[in-house]
Image (spheres, rainbow, N blue to C red):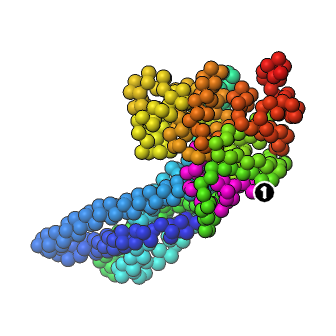
Amino acid sequence: MLLTLLRRHLPHYTLQVGIVLVLLLVQSIANLYLPNLNAEIINNGVATGDTAYIVRTGSLMLAVTLVLALVAVATAYMASRVAQGVGRDLRGSLFTRVLSFSAREMDHFGTPSLITRNTNDVQQIQMFLQIGLMLLVSAPIMAIGGVIMALHEDVHLSLLLVVIVPLMAAVVAVLLSQAVPLFRVMQVRLDRVTQVLREQIMGVRVIRAFVRVEPEAERFERANADLTGTALRVNRIFAAAFPMLMGIMNLSTVAVLYFGGRLVDSGDMPIGNLTAFLMYIMQILMAVLMAVGMVIFVPRAEASAERIADVLDTVPAVTDPARPREPTGATGAVTFRDVTFGYPHGDRPVLQDVTFELRPGETMAVIGGTGSGKSTLVKLVTRAFDVSGGVLEVDGLDVREQSRERLWSRLGLVPQQAYLFQGTVADNLRFGRADASEAELWHALEVAQASDFVAAMPGALDAPIDQGGTNVSGGQRQRLAIARALVKRPDIYLFDDCFSALDATTDARLRAALRADTAGAAVLIVAQRVSTILHADRIVVLDEGRIVGLGPHAELMRTCEPYREIVESQLGEAAAA
């Protein structure tokens, strides 16, 4: 999978990779040439006392070394450019793919895992690529070149390689077989640590309120201990492998000196050639060690590549049609016709045979018990999920036949949990319409009953908002989210239980201002509180996913027993009457 992933992205950097390969070839040739020069100095200079020859050849060695240093710097620079570029492309591809995911894929992968894949996993690929371009390419060149040069120095002494190389290969094979599965486990356990940490940071107030600090600390410690244990097992494997490889290298040196010394003593081999042969043997073994060093990165990079490919190869359940259609007119109508929907792996459908039409200029409310499918209606309109059966139309055309961007441009959504982005108040309000004027922003704030507290904030519209809106209260977040939708001026408003944090007085003022400001638009309000929806044009009453009542408040009080029970439970029998 690692090679498949690199084949997708490396072609964009063919020129840079080619330059790296050429530089590595020059670097390897220079490294292989230096021992030969050293042998000539010993044989032709030191042995004969020719100082001039030593100076000439030594100067050539210095020049080769200088070129080698410059080439090494250039190689590292180009390899870094390639690795960082591929990392940037991978992060961009992951981000784009995740943005296309429906709620189903988001639930499948989970937020912590997606964060880890876009950060840690991509970083593993970058590290592998940067070091791999420099080591995995140069190591074979050095090993093969070293063998050829060693054979050139002495064929009989080169027979030692028949014993040394298989020994080192056996150690590397065992190392790979043990390390690869553990690196895959490490990535999964890193996901778990990220998930637990994210839950505890986001839910810190709940943890403290329920005095769960110690149990949650123990839960994090268990996840952390699992990751630490796996990392220690990997490190123990490498801690055992490297001394074995170094032992093979040292024994090889002893063997070369022993047998080579006998050849020198018998006059069959010059002392300079023995020195060069020893240097070539060390280069071969160092090349093997470099490859082993890469073993640390290969398994993790392979595991990370598989996790990245899982995301990139996932086809979203909700996609744009091959040939999107445009509605004949922007009517602003939303029509549910015999809609049925069930969540993946759910026991039964959440919505069954839901039929109603939201018309332009109409305010329609949806109410029902917990789990009756109220918020699911909003998710279907926004295509977080697609209907399992029936037809859902916006502007008179099935939403599955429209492009999602066109559909979303028609909607103004205020979600159940209001979320604000880091920036200023104005930045958040302009999220849906970047060219909105300050006058339009203040108008939206006035309708959302948020102008007073925004005006009191230091900087007003330029007041900073923390990530998630954590520096404002829950009610203020909801009002800013409502103002954000109003700035967009869409034809269809979707308010998903977004008035729950408002007091009764603010709620009443907001609804009155909202009704006047959205008079020409279709408005769908999902609510738990009856007081929020009493004055809606029509009310949809859901019970276990089915519509059990549809009509104005007064009519439902006469004809719909479940609705009457909801009203009486919240307002009392006297108020309901």
* 382 shown above or below 52: above
- Residue at (22, 65) in percent of width and height: 66
**Where does residue 2 sit, x and y in percent of width and height?**
55, 65
Along the line of sight, the residue nearer the viewer: 352 or 554: 554
Image quadrant in which the C terminus is located: top right
**Where does residue 223 sit, x and y in percent of width and height?**
64, 39
Left/right placement of residue 189 relative to residue 259 reads right
Residue bearing mark 1: 390
Q: Would residue 407 be counted in the magenta stretch?
A: yes
* 358 shown above or below 16: above
- Residue at (46, 41) in percent of width and height: 430
Looking at the image, which residue sits at the far top? 574
Q: Which residues are magenta?
A: 386-414
**Where does residue 3 sit, x and y in percent of width and height?**
53, 68
Left/right placement of residue 75 relative to residue 406 reads left
At label 1, the amino acid type is Gly
- Residue at (28, 66) in percent of width and height: 71
- Tag 1's secondary structure? strand
Along the line of sight, the residue nearer the viewer: 79 or 432: 432
Q: Can I make out residue 99 in this image?
A: yes
* 81 shown above or below 555: below
